[in-house]
């Protein structure tokens, strides 16, 4: 896990501000039309013009993202634990998990929408499918990577299978699980946006992805940029929050 | 205490790790298994612990075989749970068996290895030598009849190794347990052992038994120690182990 030193955080902020300044200068000096590339000031103005609408859309996207991440975490962890406990379960379920990983969600989203019916639930299912694999795969690897000597120690002391899973396999898998969770956090947002694009085209207007589509149709490029900036900020916030959670939970691990 | 007759171990891939091992272990022995890498020392230890089953021969206990917890095992690495404090690591065998006074007994075992003050410390905050002491305390917390040690001091510096060797001898003597100790080191074998079994590879087997030392005469210097090292060295040279 990378822990950024304070100097690096400052460098990140400075480079971000410099990029904004450069963007503003290039757009102004080269007279780039705002429908092609709006300046940062125009993007900020577009955000200010409809802040409640855009923030409401962000909230809708985040509710899909968070629900999907929780579901993916629950399903991924349970499935990994089941596969770690039984070779039969591994043989039976492993091919399905790979199929789930390699099938593009865009291709199955229309089917999910038809099957699930409720638009929110359909978007959550799509985002869950995208976010599921990293947390599942990492947790499964962690459960399999328990030091064999520790498992020997458990056997030597007559431990039950449940004691082995709860006292050593699951705690030993936590660093792996958290690394997977961080990747899944970003993917849940990607899955939510993709699901919104697909369902949005079917007439469901709520999340940021639909706002982007809508602004694109109306050639409101600055509003598109504002929605995009909100999405990026949400992704960054999810990543930082999960990084903080990892550091908090791994303090004892060293 | 334990007798192995004609014990062999062949792995699933056909590798013959051990062949025709015959050995009698007496109570309070400090038996050292000495030999090059790949001669089946650790495999033999695992068979004694019941972690593996022999493919040939049999292993018999005189009297009742030890139940879960009556065999202590110290691995080459301390193998502690990094998320658990020192006392929780030590108390693990008791917790697995549902012993009620686990914390008090773990504290007692930590005191035995001189780490009474470190009960709440996490493994990452301890030095290599201290971690190995925690591992030894964990093996001793159940007051085992048989203590199996698989090259426990191989990764430690010379100063810590000497200190831990002495502490280990004092503890096994105090707890009156029988010890089987695996090592590559002639010096370690010459210093610790009451008996030395020399092993050779391909397949792993016992090729010679050499006398060790009497507890009261243990020393790392002097004519007797040098003679034991010389005898072990000569026996090892006779093995003609290919590089």
Image: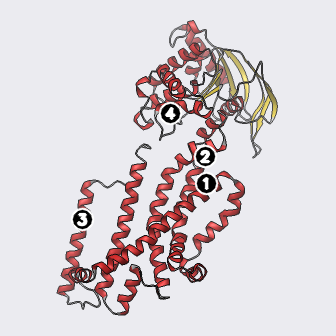
State which chain disc 1 sits on: A
- The answer for which chain carries disc 3 is A
> How far is disc 1 from disc 4 in space, using C-alphas?
24 Å
Q: What number is the disc on residue A13?
A: 3
In the image, taking residue A36 as reference, residue A197 lies left or right, namely right
**Separation (CA) of disc 1 from disc 3:** 41 Å
Q: CA distance from mark 3 to mark 2?
A: 44 Å
Comparing labels 1 and 3, the label whose residue is closer to the camera: 1
- The reply to whether callout 1 and callout 2 are in contact (CB within 8 Å) is yes
Task: Give the percent coordinates (x, y) of residue A172.
Answer: 53, 46
Q: Nearer the viewer, residue B38 or A212?
A: A212
Q: CA distance from mark 1 to mark 2?
A: 8 Å
* Marks 1 & 3 on one chain: yes
Closest to the observer: B16 or B179? B179
Please provide percent x and percent y for residue A202. 50, 88
**Is the same chain shared between marks 1 and 4?**
no
- For numbered disc 3, what is the local secondary structure? helix
Looking at the rendered structure, the secondary structure element under dot 1 is helix
Examine the rendered structure and indicate whether residue B30 appears above or below residue A182.
above
Answer with the quarter of the image where residue A62 lies: bottom left
Disc 2: which residue? A165
In percent of width and height, residue A134 lies at 52, 63
Mark identifier at residue B88: 4
Instruction: Using the image, determine if residue B104 lies above or below residue A161.
Output: above
Chain letter for mark 2:
A
């Amino acid at each position: 896990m990378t822990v950024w030193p304070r100097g690096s955080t400052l460098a990140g902020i400075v480079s971000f501000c410099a990029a904004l300044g450069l963007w503003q200068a290039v757009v102004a000096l080269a007279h780039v039309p705002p429908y092609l590339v709006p300046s940062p000031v125009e993007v900020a103005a577009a955000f200010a013009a409809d802040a409640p609408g855009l923030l409401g859309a962000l909230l809708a996207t985040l509710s899909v993202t968070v629900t999907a991440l929780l579901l993916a975490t629950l399903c991924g962890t349970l499935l990994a634990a089941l596969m770690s406990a039984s070779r039969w379960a591994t043989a039976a379920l492993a091919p399905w998990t790979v199929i789930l990983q390699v099938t593009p969600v865009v291709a199955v989203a229309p089917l999910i929408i038809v099957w699930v019916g409720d638009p929110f639930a359909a978007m959550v299912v799509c985002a869950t499918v995208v976010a599921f694999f990293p947390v599942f795969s990492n947790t499964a690897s962690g459960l399999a990577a328990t030091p064999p000597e520790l498992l020997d120690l458990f056997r030597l002391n007559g431990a039950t299978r449940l004691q082995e899973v709860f006292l050593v396999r699951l705690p030993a898998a936590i660093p792996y699980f958290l690394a997977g969770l961080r990747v899944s956090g970003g993917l849940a947002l990607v899955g939510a946006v993709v699901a919104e694009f697909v369902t949005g085209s079917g007439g469901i207007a709520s999340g940021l992805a639909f706002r982007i589509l809508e602004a694109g149709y109306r050639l409101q490029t600055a509003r598109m940029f504002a929605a995009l900036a909100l999405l990026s900020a949400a992704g960054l916030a999810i990543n930082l929050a999960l990084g903080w959670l990892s550091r908090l939970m791994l303090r004892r691990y060293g | 205490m334990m007798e192995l007759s004609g014990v062999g171990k062949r792995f699933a891939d056909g590798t013959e790790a051990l062949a025709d091992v015959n050995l009698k272990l007496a109570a309070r022995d400090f038996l050292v298994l000495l030999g090059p890498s790949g001669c089946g020392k650790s495999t033999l230890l695992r068979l004694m612990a019941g972690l593996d089953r022999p493919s040939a021969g049999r292993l018999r206990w005189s009297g009742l075989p030890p139940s879960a917890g009556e065999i202590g095992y110290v691995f080459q690495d301390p193998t502690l749970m990094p998320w658990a404090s020192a006392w929780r690591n030590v108390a693990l065998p008791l917790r697995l068996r549902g012993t009620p006074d686990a914390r008090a007994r773990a504290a007692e075992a930590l005191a035995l290895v001189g780490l009474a003050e470190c009960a709440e410390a996490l493994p990452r905050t301890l030095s290599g030598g201290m971690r190995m002491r925690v591992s030894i305390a964990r093996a001793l917390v159940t007051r085992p009849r048989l203590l199996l040690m698989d090259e426990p001091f191989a990764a430690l510096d010379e100063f810590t190794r000497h200190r831990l060797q002495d502490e280990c001898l004092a503890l096994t003597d105090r707890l009156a347990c029988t010890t089987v100790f695996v090592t590559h080191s002639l010096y370690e074998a010459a210093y610790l052992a009451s008996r030395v079994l020399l092993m050779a590879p391909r397949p792993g087997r016992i090729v010679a038994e050499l006398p060790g030392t009497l507890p009261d005469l243990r020393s790392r210097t002097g004519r007797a120690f040098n003679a034991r090292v010389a005898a072990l060295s000569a026996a090892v040279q006779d093995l003609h182990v290919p590089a």
